[in-house]
Amino acid sequence: MESAVHGMPSQRVAGKVAVVTGGRGDLGSATARLLAEHGASVASLDRAGTPAGGNHPGITEYDVDVTDESSVARTIGKLSEELGAPDILVNAAGIIGVAGASHTASMEDFNAIFDVNVKGVWLMTKYVVPGMIARQSGSIINFSSIHGLTGGRNVPLYHATKGAVRLLSKSDAAAYGSHGVRVNSIHPGSMNTRMSRRSAEQSEIGAEAYYRQLVGSNPLPRQGEPDEIAYGVLYLASDESRFTTGSELVIDGGYTAV
């Protein structure tokens, strides 16, 4: 959305403090940049050692381990002191795990993916939402997936975590709505990202056939681009969506429509 007067992006989240986990990944970094362009002070959080995507005005980088409660508590405390209490939380951090049927996974595989994809969302919410409750305002956007709505054979544990995120979002929407805090989930389809490529490369039918099967029969037969997800997050983060909570924003080229 462009300003008719200045030709610059309208400030849809001006004056807000936004926290984005997985902020150095493809979807997280696109989201962090767009929120910053629209006026937010953005805290981009990711694991220590993950390369940042470069310096962007309005974005401050923080290291965090979303699976570790002390790391989350310490990081939220630090960024709140430096930027202010968060108005927006985007839980974009996630891993896809090892491909294979459920019985082929190890306990280590199971624990690793649930720790990041589910416990990480819960821990971030646990430490951000009290400040939102105190101000009676806030927006939380949790990254699920189309496979939080449907099953799939390639990475079943990943799909299970995304189903959990979907229902945690709805439950938290019910719990925090009376405090003015909105909670929604976003459900990307197949995206042009490094994580998607890793999944395709693990497929038993090969990457090319995997993509053909996944998106070839979509109404919009292509992969999505990170900024197409970021604009969905921007809507849910902004006051434009002030009557939207407990919802599922599906951005998938029509994958779940057919």
Image: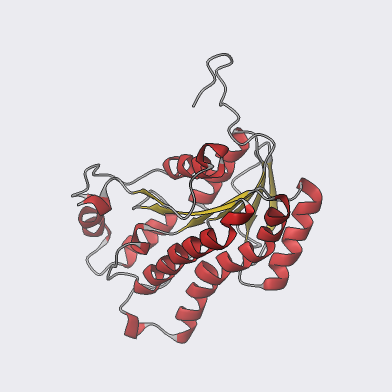
Q: What residue do we see at 64% from left, 61% from top? A: 49
When asked about the image quadrant of residue 166, the answer is bottom left
Q: What residue do we see at 73% from left, 66% from top? A: 73
**Residue 165 visible in the current orientation:** yes
| On screen, residue 131 above or below 254 | below
- Number of numbered discs on residues: 0
Relative image position of residue 75 (x, y in whole percent): 73, 61
Coloring basis for residues: secondary structure
Relative image position of residue 242 (x, y in whole percent): 54, 42
Residue found at the far front of this picture: 178
When asked about the image quadrant of residue 67, the answer is bottom right
Q: Is residue 234 found left or right of 59 in the rendered image?
A: left
| On screen, residue 211 above or below 42 | below
Q: What residue do we see at 67% from left, 59% from top? A: 128
Relative image position of residue 144 (x, y in whole percent): 44, 59
Residue found at the far right of this picture: 81
**Residue 22 visible in the current orientation:** no
Q: Nearer the viewer, residue 238 or 217?
A: 238
| On screen, residue 101 above or below 218 | below
Relative image position of residue 240 (x, y in whole percent): 52, 36
Residue found at the far top of this picture: 5
Q: Nearer the viewer, residue 179 or 233?
A: 179
